Image (cartoon, grey):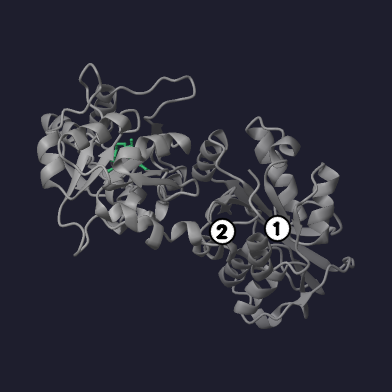
């Protein structure tokens, strides 16, 4: 067997949109993915469903894979013929041990590609409105480690050169040593009034910035209880945060929204929320499985076809084509109780009726397996497909729940209430209690009722269930902490 290829990929910090196009392409190709704690859980959505996922960060039991073990896995998986992606936060070459990993691969005679990422030392400040260079303020930049393997953990840096020769410095992994870093720079000639900024969880909904003159930065960061991961920027441009900050000004900044999905179709809510500054999880994710779909029964004897789900439309049309059934011979009445299904049918030139009228004896129901109560009314059914939960979104959801990222939940339908409850149960979380400090939105009175029956009063109930009203309501609703 020929050995597989290895990609050492930079994910960028925070925001999953910061991965490069190439990085994402390589990730999608991978059979095996090794990822770190600082890689945003939402990256898992770019990973193939059938890929093997290996988490290398700290596990709840506090074990983590040692570097040698990680390298060994990389080598073994590649030798076994798999395409392997090693996904690191930021850039793999910036305090990311890409050098050591590549050496191990060379030693094993394996081929690899290094795919750069955007490093936290540049993306972090950018998300805080701080450019690391500036025509008037800074003409040089250095990335510096804020800690080392030395026994006292102090960075072994040439402080004199750093203080004298570098305009802007970014300190990684430096939270523990922030006081020492500031003192050393000042002792070695840096002006104590030099602006400094510490950016915590840069490029995420949790981003916070502490900004002060170098001599007071440690005190300020402590006051604000800034913790890891955080990047420290020292230099004149750090003061630009006050003037140029932009992320914090977005109307939905700070929100991490879970849109509870009931179908595989892409929605319009997520991109709208993102553009207003929110982070978004769409889960569960589904794939449409037709492997067990029985051949379509002939639609001719029926007077009404009732299509229950958007995904059924493609499957139906495909079956009709396969069986050479002309659309002009379909029953006169095609109905649906779902707007999205109505639109989908229209895209094929089938103008259906929007109704939930009970079926007559000559009606055929077309929809997914486990569709709930509607299907029971019909005596004749054709199950078009099955929705299967995607592993990658399940993993992302678990990681986000474990770390308590989500603070807003969008519940689009009463069916979504059941799914939300099931998902939380599955993660061992009591839904009612978990939802108490979240902003919960219901898309309409039916959903509101279903939530209340389940024990939760939504914070927002939309009177017209569209994206515009949701955005409007969320903007006016302050974030619960
Ligand atoms: N390879 C990474 C750095 C790994 S070292 C990169 O290029 O960015 C880990 C350090 O990176 C953290 O201690 C912190 O200083 C910084 N870091 C990573 N992600 C960050 C984030 N989202 N916000 C702020 N700092 C971050």
- Counting residues from the N terminus, which is met first, the one under dot 1 or under dot 2? 2
Separation (CA) of disc 1 from disc 2: 19 Å
Relative image position of residue 37 (x, y in whole percent): 40, 34
Q: Quadrant of ligand 1?
A: top left
Q: Residue at x 16, y 28 (%)?
A: 156
Task: Give the foreground label among 1 and 2.
Answer: 2
The residue drawn where x is 33% and y is 47% is: 11
The residue that disc 2 covers is 252
Left or right of 144? Residue 464 is: right
Indicate left or right for 411 with 214 as reference. Answer: right
Residue 253 horizontal side relative to residue 172, left or right: right
Mark 2 Cβ and ligand 1 under 8 Å apart: no
Which residue in the protein does label 1 denote?
412
| Res 154 → quadrant | top left
Q: Please state the horizontal and vertical placement of residue 229, each as a whole percent of the image.
A: 39, 37
For image coordinates 87% across by 69% down, the residue present is: 357
The quadrant of the rendering that contains the N terminus is: top left
At mark 2, the secondary structure is: loop
Q: Is residue 87 above or below residue 410?
A: above
Q: Position of residue 129 (x, y in %)?
A: 36, 58
Instruction: State the image quarter where residue 331 is shown.
Output: bottom right
Q: How far from the left and from the top, in percent, is residue 66?
A: 30, 22
- Label 1, secondary structure: give it: loop
Dot 1 and dot 2 residues touching (CB under 8 Å): no
Nearest to the observer: residue 190 or residue 395: 190
Q: Nearer the viewer, residue 336 or 187?
A: 187
Does residue 400 appear in the picture of this structure? yes
- Bin the neighbour count of mark 1 within 10 Å (Cα to Cα): few under 14, some 14-19, many 20 and up: many
Instruction: Judge by depth and name the residue closer to the eye, 21 or 347.
Output: 21
Can I make out residue 1 in this image?
no
């Amino acid at each position: 067997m020929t050995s597989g290829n290895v990609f050492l990929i930079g994910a960028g910090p925070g925001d999953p949109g910061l991965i490069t196009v190439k990085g994402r392409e390589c990730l999608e190709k991978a059979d095996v993915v090794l990822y770190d704690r600082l890689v945003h859980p939402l990256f898992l959505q770019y990973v193939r469903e059938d890929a093997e996922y290996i988490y290398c960060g700290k596990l709840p039991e506090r074990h983590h894979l040692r570097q040698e073990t990680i390298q060994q896995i990389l080598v073994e998986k590649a030798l076994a013929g798999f395409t392997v992606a090693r996904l690191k936060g930021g850039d793999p070459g910036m305090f990311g041990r890409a050098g050591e990993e590549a050496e191990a691969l060379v030693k094993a005679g394996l081929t690899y590609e290094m795919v750069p990422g955007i490093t936290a030392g540049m993306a972090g400040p950018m998300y805080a409105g701080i450019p690391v260079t500036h025509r008037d303020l800074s003409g040089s930049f250095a990335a510096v480690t804020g800690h080392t393997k030395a026994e006292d953990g102090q960075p072994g840096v040439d402080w004199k050169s750093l203080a004298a020769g570098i305009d802007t410095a970014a300190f990684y992994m430096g939270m523990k040593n922030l006081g020492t870093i500031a003192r050393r720079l000042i002792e070695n000639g840096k002006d104590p009034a030099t602006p400094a900024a510490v950016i915590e969880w840069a490029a995420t909904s949790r981003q916070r910035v502490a900004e002060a003159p170098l001599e007071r930065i440690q005190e300020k960061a402590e006051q604000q209880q800034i913790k890891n991961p955080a990047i420290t920027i020292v230099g004149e441009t750090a003061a630009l945060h006050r003037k140029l900050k932009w992320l914090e000004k977005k109307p939905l900044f700070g929100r991490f929204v879970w849109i509870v999905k009931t179908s595989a179709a892409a929605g319009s809510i997520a991109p709208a929320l993102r553009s207003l500054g929110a982070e978004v999880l769409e889960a569960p994710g589904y794939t449409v499985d037709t492997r067990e779909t029985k051949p379509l029964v002939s639609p001719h004897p029926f007077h009404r076809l009732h299509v229950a789900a958007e995904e059924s439309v493609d499957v139906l049309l495909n079956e009709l084509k396969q069986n050479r059934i002309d659309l002009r011979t379909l029953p006169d009445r095609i109905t649906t109780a779902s707007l999205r299904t109505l639109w989908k049918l229209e895209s094929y030139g089938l103008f259906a009726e929007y109704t939930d009228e009970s079926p007559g004896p000559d009606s055929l129901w077309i929809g997914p397996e486990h569709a709930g109560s509607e299907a029971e009314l019909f005596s004749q059914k054709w199950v078009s497909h099955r929705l299967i939960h995607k592993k990658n979104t399940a993993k992302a959801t678990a990681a986000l729940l474990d770390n308590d990222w989500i603070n807003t939940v969008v519940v689009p339908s009463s069916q979504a209430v059941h799914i939300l409850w099931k998902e939380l149960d599955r993660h061992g979380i009591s839904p009612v209690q978990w939802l108490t400090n979240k902003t919960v939105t219901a898309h309409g009175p039916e959903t509101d009722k279903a939530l209340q029956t389940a024990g939760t009063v939504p914070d927002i109930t939309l009177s017209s269930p569209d994206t515009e009203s949701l955005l409007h309501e969320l903007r006016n609703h302050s974030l619960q902490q």
